[in-house]
Image (cartoon, coloured by chain):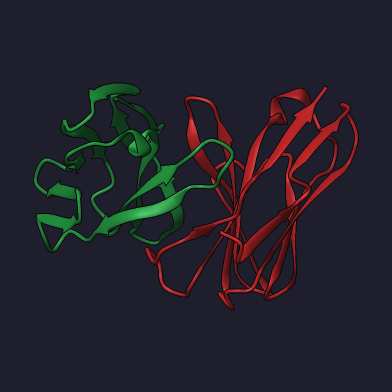
Amino acid sequence: QQQVKQSPQSLIVQKGGISIINCAYENTAFDYFPWYQQFPGKGPALLIAIRPDVSEKKEGRFTISFNKSAKQFSLHIMDSQPGDSATYFCAASGGGADGLTFGKGTHLIIQP
Amino acid sequence: DADVTQTPRNRITKTGKRIMLECSQTKGHDRMYWYRQDPGLGLRLIYYSFDVKDINKGEISDGYSVSRQAQAKFSLSLESAIPNQTALYFCATGPTGTGDTQYFGPGTRLTVL
C-alpha cells in the first residue's frame, strides 16, 4: 500500500523556469509533510516542511502548497537553477506511525 | 551530514553471509532510524528506536535485525544476506517528537552477490 504518491518520476526544466512536483497522501492522520533533496552519493537533506494548519510555506525560491481537503501537497521551485538538479522526495509522518513515509522520488534536471 | 556517520560506505558480500552496518551520531538525538533506498521506490523504513531500550519494526523489517548499543549508536544486521537486499541503506536521527526533522547519514551501498 503506497501511502504517498509522487509525480512526475522525472522532470526537465529550463534554467529560470518553475519546477513543480506533486504528492498525494492517503492517511488523514499525517500531520507533517517535509520535502527532501538528494544529490548523487549523498543522503537526503531536509529542504522545507509544512504542517496542515497552513496552506503555503515559502523559503527562498522553494514553496510548499498544501491542500488538506484534496490530500495533496506540492513543491514549487522558482527561478530553477542547474544546482537544483537532484532527486526530490516528498514524505509524510504522524498519526501514530513513526518514521517517514516517502514518495518514490522525482529526478529533476535543470537545463542551462 | 557529518554529524551522522555510517560505516562501511560500500560493501560487497556473498549470499548467506552475515553483515553489520553501523551508524553513529553526535547530535544527541534520542531517535534513530534505518531506511532502505531502491531505485524508483523511494526510502522505506526498516527499524527505528526511540531510546536504548526501545526497538520497533518498520515497514520492511523481515530479514533484518538491529541493535541500539548506546544513544549514539544504532547498527543494522543482515543475518543471512540475499541478493534482493542489494540497496542503499541510510541511517537517520531525529529529536523526540513525531514529525520532527530527520537528519540522514551519507549511506551505505550494499551489494549481495
Residue at x-position 16% and y-position 30%: A17
Q: Is residue A3 visible?
A: no
Q: Residue B83's spot in the image, x, y percent?
A: 76, 24
B65 left or right of B15 in image: left
A11 left or right of A59 in image: right
Q: Residue A3's spot in the image, x, y percent?
A: 35, 38
A91 left or right of B42 in image: left
The chain drawn red is chain what? B
The correct choice, above or below, for B24 with respect to B112 in the image is: below
Number of numbered markers? 0
Q: Residue A79's spot in the image, x, y percent?
A: 17, 39
Residue at x-position 39% and y-position 55%: A46
In what quadrant of the picture does the C terminus of chain B appear? top right
> B30 and A29: which one is in front?
B30
Residue furthest front as drawn? A112
B108 left or right of A33 in image: right
The chain drawn green is chain what? A
Quarter-of-image position of residue B31:
bottom right
Quarter-of-image position of residue B79:
top right
Q: Is residue B102 visible?
A: yes
In what quadrant of the picture does the N terminus of chain B appear? bottom right
Q: Residue B111's spot in the image, x, y percent?
A: 76, 29
The correct choice, above or below, for A57 with respect to A85 in the image is: below
Residue at x-position 34% and y-position 59%: A94
